[in-house]
Image: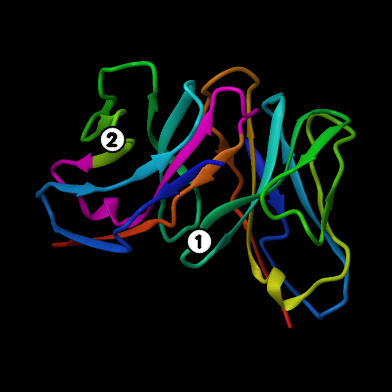
Amino acid sequence: AQTVTQSQPEMSVQEAETVTLSCTYDTSESDYYLFWYKQPPSRQMILVIRQEAYKQQNATENRFSVNFQKAAKSFSLKISDSQLGDAAMYFCALGGGTSYGKLTFGQGTILTVHP
Amino acid sequence: NAGVTQTPKFQVLKTGQSMTLQCAQDMNHEYMSWYRQDPGMGLRLIHYSVGAGITDQGEVPNGYNVSRSTTEDFPLRLLSAAPSQTSVYFCASRPGGRGYEQYFGPGTRLTVT
């Protein structure tokens, strides 16, 4: 069975500062993918960033980057230059390479951005 | 290109009633899934499909049925609603193959009284 744990129910950051959201996971598969999704108050699920387990290089998307520690099974999300629009619930998710698209989600972290 | 659409957006049911949550996608995606979102528990997989005519159970399938007669549609049926099924329901789709992201619909908030 796969598990994903987000140990920070809530986080806050000042506008323009940097914040890191934590995620740990467990899987017996060697071929898997990790995702961070953002859910603003509109409820829409939006992909933030994706990491392939077999790639050692950490993924980046503009102000968003990950720290992927495969041996430690850790997958944290760093948001640089935080903006008010970054305020949302963030979910870490794990998908196995052969899992036909099934995702296992963490519990979520609510991010508040202070002006 | 509407992406993934879900209807209705909100629904209130009485215990024991049945209903169908509709989901459709216009991206010709092979895989479709239903998740429920509950506070403090993230999203949990209810049922999924890898193609027309093929469905399977996820983590929390009890009380729900699905079918997939076309590539585009993947309805979720609540046979006899219970208060424990009060939740937000998301439909998602993605292309076949490895590592693709899932595209989510806007969700349905269901309350069972």
Q: Is residue B95 above or below residue B23?
A: above
| Along the viewing direction, whichever of A28 and A59 lies nearer the viewer | A28
Q: Residues within 10 Å of mark 2 (few under 14, many from 20)?
A: few
Image quadrant containing the N terminus of chain A: top right
Under mark 1, the amino acid is Met
Where does the image place residue B7, in percent across and percent down from the top left? 73, 55
> Label 1: chain?
B
Under mark 2, the amino acid is Ala
Q: In which quarter of the image is residue B21?
A: bottom right
Magenta span contains residue A79: yes
The structure residue drawn at horizontal position 50% and vertical position 61%, both measured from the top left corner, is B41
Range of residues picked out in magenta:
A78-101
Cα gap from disc 1 to disc 2, whole angstroms: 23 Å
Residue where numbered disc 2 is placed: A72
Residue where numbered disc 1 is placed: B41
The structure residue drawn at horizontal position 50% and vertical position 31%, both measured from the top left corner, is A28
Which of the two discs, 1 and 2, sits closer to the camera?
2
